[in-house]
Amino acid sequence: MVLPPAVVIHGLPHARLALRPRRAVTLLSAPGAPSYAGVAWWRAVVAAVRTEFPESDPPDMLDCADAPGRALEALSLDCRFIVLRPGPAFADIAGRAAAKGAVLLSEPPPALDLGDRGALRRLDAWLGLPELDVTAASPSAKPRPSVQRHMGTNMQVTPTVKAILDNYESDNPGSKANLARIMMQGRLGGTGKMVILPVDQGFEHGPARSFAPNPAAYDPQYHFRLALAAGLNAYAAPLGMIEAGAGTFAGALPTILKLNSSNSLATEKDQAVTGSVADALRLGCSAIGFTIYPGSEYAFEQMEELRELAEEAKSVGLAVVVWSYPRGPELDKAAETAVDICAYAAHMAALLGAHIVKVKPPTAVVSLEAAKKTYATQDIDISTMAKRVAHVVQCCFNGRRIVVFSGGEARSDVDSILEDIRGIRDGGANGSIIGRNTFQRPEAEAMSMLGKIIDLYLEKA
Protein backbone atom coordinates (compact mmCIF):
# COMPACT_ATOMS: atom_id res chain seq x y z
CA MET A 1 0.00 0.00 0.00
CA VAL A 2 1.34 3.41 -0.95
CA LEU A 3 0.82 6.50 1.21
CA PRO A 4 1.95 10.14 0.88
CA PRO A 5 4.98 11.37 2.88
CA ALA A 6 4.36 11.42 6.63
CA VAL A 7 4.34 14.49 8.88
CA VAL A 8 4.28 14.26 12.69
CA ILE A 9 1.63 16.55 14.14
CA HIS A 10 1.02 17.43 17.79
CA GLY A 11 -2.49 18.81 17.39
CA LEU A 12 -4.95 20.47 15.05
CA PRO A 13 -2.80 23.57 14.35
CA HIS A 14 0.01 21.37 13.01
CA ALA A 15 -2.46 19.40 10.90
CA ARG A 16 -3.71 22.62 9.31
CA LEU A 17 -0.16 23.69 8.52
CA ALA A 18 0.59 20.30 6.96
CA LEU A 19 -2.47 20.45 4.70
CA ARG A 20 -2.32 24.07 3.57
CA PRO A 21 0.31 23.46 0.87
CA ARG A 22 -2.48 21.43 -0.79
CA ARG A 23 -0.18 18.47 -1.25
CA ALA A 24 -0.87 14.89 -0.25
CA VAL A 25 0.31 14.08 3.27
CA THR A 26 0.02 11.30 5.84
CA LEU A 27 -0.72 12.62 9.33
CA LEU A 28 1.35 10.76 11.94
CA SER A 29 1.00 11.15 15.70
CA ALA A 30 3.99 11.65 17.98
CA PRO A 31 5.35 8.39 19.43
CA GLY A 32 3.24 7.33 22.40
CA ALA A 33 0.71 10.13 21.94
CA PRO A 34 -2.21 7.79 22.76
CA SER A 35 -0.76 7.22 26.24
CA TYR A 36 -0.60 10.87 27.22
CA ALA A 37 -3.24 12.47 25.00
CA GLY A 38 -5.62 9.60 24.27
CA VAL A 39 -6.83 7.76 21.18
CA ALA A 40 -10.09 9.71 21.36
CA TRP A 41 -8.08 12.93 21.16
CA TRP A 42 -6.39 11.70 17.97
CA ARG A 43 -9.69 10.69 16.42
CA ALA A 44 -11.11 14.12 17.26
CA VAL A 45 -8.14 15.85 15.60
CA VAL A 46 -8.49 13.72 12.48
CA ALA A 47 -12.26 14.29 12.34
CA ALA A 48 -11.76 18.05 12.61
CA VAL A 49 -9.15 17.94 9.82
CA ARG A 50 -11.46 16.06 7.49
CA THR A 51 -14.25 18.52 8.21
CA GLU A 52 -12.02 21.51 7.43
CA PHE A 53 -10.26 19.91 4.44
CA PRO A 54 -12.88 17.62 2.88
CA GLU A 55 -11.07 17.58 -0.45
CA SER A 56 -7.86 16.23 1.12
CA ASP A 57 -9.07 13.27 3.23
CA PRO A 58 -5.50 12.57 4.42
CA PRO A 59 -4.59 9.11 5.73
CA ASP A 60 -3.70 9.13 9.43
CA MET A 61 -1.39 6.89 11.41
CA LEU A 62 -1.39 6.52 15.21
CA ASP A 63 1.93 5.66 16.89
CA CYS A 64 1.13 3.66 20.04
CA ALA A 65 4.83 3.12 20.87
CA ASP A 66 4.98 0.06 23.16
CA ALA A 67 1.40 0.23 24.52
CA PRO A 68 -0.66 -2.71 23.19
CA GLY A 69 -3.73 -1.54 25.08
CA ARG A 70 -3.67 1.69 23.14
CA ALA A 71 -3.35 -0.24 19.89
CA LEU A 72 -6.43 -2.29 20.80
CA GLU A 73 -8.30 0.89 21.62
CA ALA A 74 -7.22 2.36 18.28
CA LEU A 75 -8.62 -0.70 16.50
CA SER A 76 -11.89 -0.37 18.41
CA LEU A 77 -12.15 3.23 17.20
CA ASP A 78 -11.47 2.20 13.59
CA CYS A 79 -7.96 3.58 13.18
CA ARG A 80 -6.68 2.09 9.93
CA PHE A 81 -2.91 2.60 10.29
CA ILE A 82 -1.39 1.82 13.70
CA VAL A 83 2.23 1.63 14.86
CA LEU A 84 3.12 -0.72 17.74
CA ARG A 85 6.61 -1.76 18.80
CA PRO A 86 7.07 -5.56 18.74
CA GLY A 87 6.22 -7.33 21.98
CA PRO A 88 4.31 -10.36 23.33
CA ALA A 89 0.93 -9.01 22.17
CA PHE A 90 2.07 -7.90 18.70
CA ALA A 91 1.10 -11.03 16.74
CA ASP A 92 -2.36 -11.20 18.30
CA ILE A 93 -3.05 -7.52 17.63
CA ALA A 94 -1.70 -7.85 14.07
CA GLY A 95 -4.23 -10.63 13.46
CA ARG A 96 -7.05 -8.51 14.83
CA ALA A 97 -5.93 -5.59 12.66
CA ALA A 98 -5.88 -7.74 9.53
CA ALA A 99 -9.36 -9.02 10.31
CA LYS A 100 -10.61 -5.44 10.44
CA GLY A 101 -8.77 -4.37 7.28
CA ALA A 102 -6.31 -2.27 9.28
CA VAL A 103 -2.52 -2.16 8.98
CA LEU A 104 -0.28 -2.71 12.02
CA LEU A 105 3.31 -1.50 11.64
CA SER A 106 6.20 -2.40 13.90
CA GLU A 107 7.81 1.02 13.44
CA PRO A 108 6.80 4.43 12.16
CA PRO A 109 7.74 5.54 8.66
CA PRO A 110 10.25 8.35 8.06
CA ALA A 111 8.53 11.61 8.92
CA LEU A 112 9.06 15.34 9.28
CA ASP A 113 8.16 16.43 12.82
CA LEU A 114 6.41 19.80 12.78
CA GLY A 115 7.42 20.24 16.41
CA ASP A 116 11.05 20.53 15.35
CA ARG A 117 12.59 23.94 14.98
CA GLY A 118 12.66 25.00 11.34
CA ALA A 119 10.38 22.16 10.21
CA LEU A 120 7.96 24.51 8.46
CA ARG A 121 10.73 25.77 6.19
CA ARG A 122 11.35 22.19 5.09
CA LEU A 123 7.70 21.20 4.70
CA ASP A 124 7.28 21.90 0.97
CA ALA A 125 10.45 20.02 0.09
CA TRP A 126 9.46 17.12 2.36
CA LEU A 127 6.02 16.75 0.79
CA GLY A 128 7.68 16.57 -2.62
CA LEU A 129 9.40 13.29 -1.67
CA PRO A 130 8.29 9.97 -3.17
CA GLU A 131 5.30 8.23 -1.64
CA LEU A 132 5.71 5.70 1.20
CA ASP A 133 5.35 1.98 0.62
CA VAL A 134 3.45 0.91 3.74
CA THR A 135 2.80 -2.75 4.42
CA ALA A 136 2.04 -4.56 7.63
CA ALA A 137 5.40 -5.21 9.26
CA SER A 138 6.45 -8.33 11.07
CA PRO A 139 8.10 -8.09 14.50
CA SER A 140 11.41 -9.09 12.92
CA ALA A 141 11.37 -6.38 10.26
CA LYS A 142 14.53 -4.29 10.17
CA PRO A 143 14.07 -0.66 11.20
CA ARG A 144 14.15 1.94 8.44
CA PRO A 145 16.01 5.20 8.96
CA SER A 146 13.78 7.97 10.29
CA VAL A 147 14.13 11.70 10.63
CA GLN A 148 11.27 11.73 13.13
CA ARG A 149 11.92 13.26 16.53
CA HIS A 150 11.12 10.60 19.11
CA MET A 151 9.34 12.23 22.02
CA GLY A 152 8.62 9.02 23.90
CA THR A 153 5.65 9.24 26.28
CA ASN A 154 6.89 12.16 28.34
CA MET A 155 4.06 14.29 29.65
CA GLN A 156 4.12 18.03 29.36
CA VAL A 157 1.64 19.02 32.06
CA THR A 158 -0.59 21.99 31.52
CA PRO A 159 -0.49 25.07 33.78
CA THR A 160 -3.80 23.93 35.29
CA VAL A 161 -2.39 20.54 36.26
CA LYS A 162 0.85 22.13 37.48
CA ALA A 163 -1.15 24.43 39.78
CA ILE A 164 -2.98 21.43 41.25
CA LEU A 165 0.26 19.50 41.78
CA ASP A 166 1.74 22.52 43.58
CA ASN A 167 -0.89 22.05 46.32
CA TYR A 168 0.80 18.79 47.35
CA GLU A 169 3.82 20.46 48.89
CA SER A 170 5.20 17.50 50.86
CA ASP A 171 4.96 14.90 48.13
CA ASN A 172 7.85 13.38 46.24
CA PRO A 173 8.21 13.54 42.45
CA GLY A 174 6.92 9.98 42.10
CA SER A 175 3.53 10.67 43.66
CA LYS A 176 3.19 13.91 41.73
CA ALA A 177 4.09 12.17 38.48
CA ASN A 178 1.42 9.54 39.08
CA LEU A 179 -1.15 12.21 39.87
CA ALA A 180 -0.10 13.90 36.64
CA ARG A 181 -0.56 10.62 34.72
CA ILE A 182 -4.16 10.49 35.90
CA MET A 183 -4.84 14.17 35.23
CA MET A 184 -3.21 14.16 31.79
CA GLN A 185 -5.06 11.05 30.57
CA GLY A 186 -8.00 10.83 28.21
CA ARG A 187 -10.35 13.46 26.83
CA LEU A 188 -10.16 15.57 29.99
CA GLY A 189 -6.36 15.36 30.11
CA GLY A 190 -4.80 18.65 31.17
CA THR A 191 -8.05 20.33 32.24
CA GLY A 192 -7.83 19.53 35.95
CA LYS A 193 -11.06 17.54 35.61
CA MET A 194 -11.38 13.76 35.61
CA VAL A 195 -13.78 10.88 35.14
CA ILE A 196 -12.71 7.56 36.66
CA LEU A 197 -14.29 4.12 36.18
CA PRO A 198 -14.50 2.14 39.46
CA VAL A 199 -15.40 -1.54 39.32
CA ASP A 200 -15.37 -2.91 42.86
CA GLN A 201 -19.05 -3.78 42.90
CA GLY A 202 -18.42 -7.52 42.41
CA PHE A 203 -17.04 -7.59 45.95
CA GLU A 204 -19.66 -5.21 47.31
CA HIS A 205 -22.84 -6.60 45.74
CA GLY A 206 -21.93 -9.92 44.10
CA PRO A 207 -21.33 -10.80 40.44
CA ALA A 208 -24.91 -11.25 39.21
CA ARG A 209 -26.23 -8.04 40.78
CA SER A 210 -23.23 -6.19 39.37
CA PHE A 211 -22.75 -7.63 35.89
CA ALA A 212 -25.87 -9.53 34.76
CA PRO A 213 -27.49 -6.32 33.41
CA ASN A 214 -24.60 -6.19 30.89
CA PRO A 215 -23.00 -9.66 30.65
CA ALA A 216 -19.95 -8.32 28.80
CA ALA A 217 -18.95 -6.76 32.12
CA TYR A 218 -18.20 -10.16 33.66
CA ASP A 219 -14.91 -9.95 31.70
CA PRO A 220 -12.39 -7.75 33.57
CA GLN A 221 -10.80 -6.67 30.28
CA TYR A 222 -14.13 -5.18 29.20
CA HIS A 223 -13.67 -2.45 31.78
CA PHE A 224 -10.16 -1.60 30.62
CA ARG A 225 -11.48 -1.29 27.07
CA LEU A 226 -14.48 0.78 28.13
CA ALA A 227 -12.31 3.24 30.07
CA LEU A 228 -9.89 3.54 27.17
CA ALA A 229 -12.50 3.86 24.44
CA ALA A 230 -14.45 6.49 26.40
CA GLY A 231 -11.32 8.55 27.05
CA LEU A 232 -11.49 8.30 30.86
CA ASN A 233 -8.69 9.31 33.23
CA ALA A 234 -8.25 6.06 35.16
CA TYR A 235 -9.69 2.69 36.10
CA ALA A 236 -10.05 1.56 39.73
CA ALA A 237 -10.63 -2.05 40.78
CA PRO A 238 -9.62 -4.75 43.30
CA LEU A 239 -6.59 -6.98 42.87
CA GLY A 240 -8.01 -9.77 40.70
CA MET A 241 -9.73 -7.45 38.24
CA ILE A 242 -6.55 -5.49 37.55
CA GLU A 243 -4.40 -8.63 37.41
CA ALA A 244 -6.69 -9.99 34.68
CA GLY A 245 -5.80 -7.13 32.31
CA ALA A 246 -2.51 -5.78 33.61
CA GLY A 247 -0.37 -7.34 30.87
CA THR A 248 -2.59 -6.63 27.90
CA PHE A 249 -3.15 -3.02 28.92
CA ALA A 250 0.24 -2.28 30.48
CA GLY A 251 0.98 1.43 30.14
CA ALA A 252 -2.29 2.14 28.34
CA LEU A 253 -4.33 3.52 31.22
CA PRO A 254 -3.60 4.73 34.77
CA THR A 255 -4.98 2.20 37.24
CA ILE A 256 -5.93 2.49 40.90
CA LEU A 257 -5.66 -0.67 43.00
CA LYS A 258 -8.45 -0.82 45.57
CA LEU A 259 -6.79 -2.24 48.69
CA ASN A 260 -9.84 -3.00 50.83
CA SER A 261 -13.31 -4.33 50.18
CA SER A 262 -16.53 -5.32 51.89
CA ASN A 263 -19.23 -7.71 50.76
CA SER A 264 -22.98 -8.01 51.13
CA LEU A 265 -22.71 -11.28 53.07
CA ALA A 266 -21.08 -9.49 56.00
CA THR A 267 -23.03 -7.79 58.79
CA GLU A 268 -20.40 -5.39 60.12
CA LYS A 269 -19.57 -1.94 58.72
CA ASP A 270 -15.97 -2.85 57.97
CA GLN A 271 -13.73 -3.81 55.07
CA ALA A 272 -10.99 -6.41 54.68
CA VAL A 273 -7.57 -5.46 53.29
CA THR A 274 -7.39 -7.41 50.01
CA GLY A 275 -4.33 -5.93 48.31
CA SER A 276 -0.97 -4.35 49.08
CA VAL A 277 1.27 -1.51 48.00
CA ALA A 278 3.60 -4.16 46.59
CA ASP A 279 0.73 -5.45 44.43
CA ALA A 280 0.11 -1.92 43.14
CA LEU A 281 3.76 -1.52 42.17
CA ARG A 282 3.90 -4.96 40.55
CA LEU A 283 0.84 -4.17 38.44
CA GLY A 284 2.08 -0.74 37.35
CA CYS A 285 -0.69 1.15 39.12
CA SER A 286 -0.64 4.92 39.55
CA ALA A 287 -2.41 4.91 42.90
CA ILE A 288 -3.91 2.88 45.71
CA GLY A 289 -7.53 3.24 46.76
CA PHE A 290 -8.93 2.71 50.27
CA THR A 291 -12.40 3.03 51.81
CA ILE A 292 -13.13 4.38 55.28
CA TYR A 293 -16.52 4.43 57.02
CA PRO A 294 -16.64 7.51 59.28
CA GLY A 295 -19.29 6.73 61.92
CA SER A 296 -18.65 2.98 61.95
CA GLU A 297 -17.52 1.09 65.03
CA TYR A 298 -14.46 0.17 62.97
CA ALA A 299 -13.67 3.65 61.65
CA PHE A 300 -10.63 4.16 63.87
CA GLU A 301 -9.11 0.82 62.82
CA GLN A 302 -9.72 1.67 59.17
CA MET A 303 -8.06 5.05 59.60
CA GLU A 304 -5.02 3.42 61.19
CA GLU A 305 -4.82 0.91 58.33
CA LEU A 306 -5.07 3.76 55.84
CA ARG A 307 -2.40 5.74 57.64
CA GLU A 308 0.09 2.88 57.30
CA LEU A 309 -0.78 2.07 53.69
CA ALA A 310 -0.75 5.72 52.62
CA GLU A 311 2.67 6.25 54.18
CA GLU A 312 4.03 3.20 52.35
CA ALA A 313 2.40 4.18 49.05
CA LYS A 314 3.73 7.72 49.15
CA SER A 315 7.21 6.48 50.04
CA VAL A 316 7.34 4.58 46.73
CA GLY A 317 5.77 7.32 44.64
CA LEU A 318 2.14 6.20 44.41
CA ALA A 319 -0.87 8.44 44.80
CA VAL A 320 -3.59 7.79 47.40
CA VAL A 321 -7.34 7.86 46.68
CA VAL A 322 -9.72 7.66 49.65
CA TRP A 323 -13.37 6.62 49.41
CA SER A 324 -14.90 8.33 52.49
CA TYR A 325 -18.40 6.91 53.01
CA PRO A 326 -20.15 7.75 56.30
CA ARG A 327 -22.14 4.87 57.78
CA GLY A 328 -22.69 3.32 61.18
CA PRO A 329 -25.22 2.70 63.94
CA GLU A 330 -25.86 6.40 64.58
CA LEU A 331 -26.33 7.31 60.91
CA ASP A 332 -29.51 6.57 59.00
CA LYS A 333 -29.71 6.59 55.19
CA ALA A 334 -30.49 10.30 55.07
CA ALA A 335 -27.51 11.08 57.27
CA GLU A 336 -25.08 9.13 55.06
CA THR A 337 -25.43 11.74 52.30
CA ALA A 338 -26.34 14.78 54.44
CA VAL A 339 -24.26 17.79 53.46
CA ASP A 340 -22.71 18.26 56.90
CA ILE A 341 -21.78 14.58 57.21
CA CYS A 342 -20.47 14.42 53.63
CA ALA A 343 -18.31 17.52 54.17
CA TYR A 344 -17.05 16.09 57.47
CA ALA A 345 -16.15 12.77 55.81
CA ALA A 346 -14.34 14.55 52.97
CA HIS A 347 -12.37 16.64 55.47
CA MET A 348 -11.35 13.48 57.34
CA ALA A 349 -10.03 11.94 54.12
CA ALA A 350 -7.97 15.07 53.44
CA LEU A 351 -6.66 15.04 57.01
CA LEU A 352 -5.61 11.39 56.55
CA GLY A 353 -3.41 12.36 53.61
CA ALA A 354 -5.57 11.59 50.57
CA HIS A 355 -4.42 13.03 47.28
CA ILE A 356 -7.86 12.38 45.79
CA VAL A 357 -10.99 12.44 47.97
CA LYS A 358 -14.09 10.52 46.85
CA VAL A 359 -17.46 11.15 48.48
CA LYS A 360 -21.12 10.85 47.53
CA PRO A 361 -23.07 13.82 46.16
CA PRO A 362 -24.50 15.64 49.20
CA THR A 363 -28.18 16.31 49.84
CA ALA A 364 -29.62 19.42 51.49
CA VAL A 365 -30.12 17.56 54.79
CA VAL A 366 -28.15 18.73 57.83
CA SER A 367 -28.00 15.73 60.14
CA LEU A 368 -25.86 16.44 63.18
CA GLU A 369 -27.74 18.38 65.85
CA ALA A 370 -24.47 20.07 66.83
CA ALA A 371 -23.99 21.28 63.25
CA LYS A 372 -27.49 22.63 62.55
CA LYS A 373 -26.93 25.88 64.44
CA THR A 374 -23.62 26.51 62.67
CA TYR A 375 -25.10 25.96 59.22
CA ALA A 376 -27.97 28.31 60.04
CA THR A 377 -26.07 31.12 61.76
CA GLN A 378 -23.05 31.14 59.42
CA ASP A 379 -25.23 31.37 56.32
CA ILE A 380 -23.69 28.32 54.64
CA ASP A 381 -25.62 28.07 51.37
CA ILE A 382 -26.72 24.49 50.70
CA SER A 383 -29.70 25.34 48.50
CA THR A 384 -28.44 23.67 45.32
CA MET A 385 -26.19 20.77 44.39
CA ALA A 386 -23.58 23.23 43.12
CA LYS A 387 -23.58 25.11 46.44
CA ARG A 388 -23.31 21.91 48.45
CA VAL A 389 -20.48 20.60 46.28
CA ALA A 390 -18.67 23.92 46.64
CA HIS A 391 -18.96 23.55 50.42
CA VAL A 392 -17.50 20.03 50.33
CA VAL A 393 -14.62 21.24 48.14
CA GLN A 394 -14.03 24.10 50.59
CA CYS A 395 -13.83 21.55 53.41
CA CYS A 396 -10.98 19.80 51.57
CA PHE A 397 -8.41 22.44 52.47
CA ASN A 398 -10.23 25.18 50.57
CA GLY A 399 -9.84 23.36 47.26
CA ARG A 400 -6.23 22.28 47.78
CA ARG A 401 -7.16 18.62 47.39
CA ILE A 402 -8.68 16.87 44.38
CA VAL A 403 -12.33 16.04 45.11
CA VAL A 404 -14.46 13.67 43.01
CA PHE A 405 -18.00 12.48 43.54
CA SER A 406 -19.53 9.05 43.06
CA GLY A 407 -22.25 8.27 40.54
CA GLY A 408 -24.61 6.91 43.18
CA GLU A 409 -27.17 4.15 42.82
CA ALA A 410 -27.79 2.67 39.38
CA ARG A 411 -30.38 4.76 37.52
CA SER A 412 -32.04 4.34 34.15
CA ASP A 413 -32.70 8.09 33.79
CA VAL A 414 -29.60 9.51 32.11
CA ASP A 415 -30.93 13.05 32.36
CA SER A 416 -30.98 12.89 36.16
CA ILE A 417 -27.37 11.66 36.17
CA LEU A 418 -26.32 14.49 33.89
CA GLU A 419 -28.14 17.00 36.08
CA ASP A 420 -26.09 15.81 39.07
CA ILE A 421 -22.93 16.13 37.00
CA ARG A 422 -23.81 19.74 36.15
CA GLY A 423 -24.12 20.51 39.84
CA ILE A 424 -20.84 18.78 40.62
CA ARG A 425 -19.12 20.68 37.81
CA ASP A 426 -20.63 24.03 38.75
CA GLY A 427 -19.61 23.49 42.38
CA GLY A 428 -15.96 23.37 41.36
CA ALA A 429 -15.28 19.68 41.98
CA ASN A 430 -12.61 17.92 39.97
CA GLY A 431 -14.89 15.30 38.53
CA SER A 432 -16.75 12.03 38.91
CA ILE A 433 -15.94 8.42 39.70
CA ILE A 434 -18.87 6.57 38.22
CA GLY A 435 -19.27 2.78 38.01
CA ARG A 436 -22.62 0.99 37.95
CA ASN A 437 -24.30 3.74 35.97
CA THR A 438 -21.85 3.05 33.15
CA PHE A 439 -20.79 -0.59 33.03
CA GLN A 440 -24.29 -1.95 33.71
CA ARG A 441 -25.45 -0.34 30.45
CA PRO A 442 -24.76 -1.85 27.03
CA GLU A 443 -21.44 -0.56 25.73
CA ALA A 444 -22.93 1.81 23.15
CA GLU A 445 -25.18 3.40 25.78
CA ALA A 446 -22.32 3.64 28.27
CA MET A 447 -20.08 5.29 25.69
CA SER A 448 -22.80 7.78 24.82
CA MET A 449 -23.44 8.69 28.45
CA LEU A 450 -19.76 8.97 29.31
CA GLY A 451 -19.27 11.18 26.27
CA LYS A 452 -22.01 13.49 27.53
CA ILE A 453 -20.49 13.55 31.03
CA ILE A 454 -17.08 14.46 29.67
CA ASP A 455 -18.64 17.12 27.46
CA LEU A 456 -20.23 18.64 30.56
CA TYR A 457 -16.87 18.83 32.30
CA LEU A 458 -15.45 20.35 29.15
CA GLU A 459 -18.34 22.81 29.38
CA LYS A 460 -19.61 21.82 25.96
CA ALA A 461 -23.15 21.24 27.20
Image (cartoon, grey):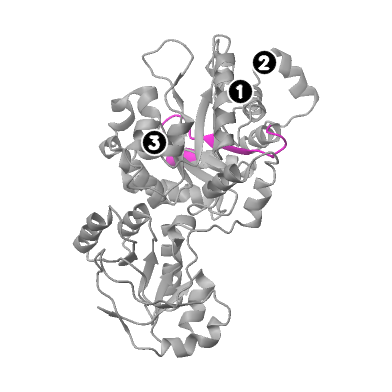
Whether residues under marks 1 and 3 lie with C-beta atoms below 8 angstroms apart, the answer is: no
Few, some or many residues within 10 Å of mark 3 (<14, 14–19, 20+): few
Dot 1 amino acid type = Ala
Q: Nearer the viewer, mark 1 or mark 3?
A: 1
| Label 3 or label 2, whichever comes before in sequence order | 2
As drawn, the label of residue 338 is 1
Whether residues under marks 2 and 1 lie with C-beta atoms below 8 angstroms apart, the answer is: yes
CA distance separating discs 3 and 2: 32 Å
- Please give the range of residues in magenta: 396-417
Name the side, left or right, on which 371 lies relative to 281: right
Q: Position of residue 113 (x, y in %)?
A: 49, 76
Question: Pointer 3: what residue?
Answer: 412
Whether residues under marks 3 and 2 lie with C-beta atoms below 8 angstroms apart, the answer is: no
As drawn, the label of residue 368 is 2
| Label 2 or label 1, whichever comes before in sequence order | 1
The magenta stretch spans residue 104: no
Q: Nearer the viewer, residue 285 or 312?
A: 312
> Residue 399: which quarter of the image?
top right
CA distance separating discs 2 and 1: 9 Å
Please tell me whether residue 328 is drawn above or below residue 273 in the rendered image.
above
Q: Nearer the viewer, residue 162 or 231?
A: 162
Q: Nearer the viewer, residue 183 or 288?
A: 288
**Residue 360 seen in the figure:** no
The magenta stretch spans residue 402: yes
As drawn, the label of residue 23 is none
- Looking at the image, which residue is at 42% across and 50% down? 251
**Residue 76 seen in the figure:** yes
Few, some or many residues within 10 Å of mark 2 (<14, 14–19, 20+): some
Dot 2 amino acid type = Leu
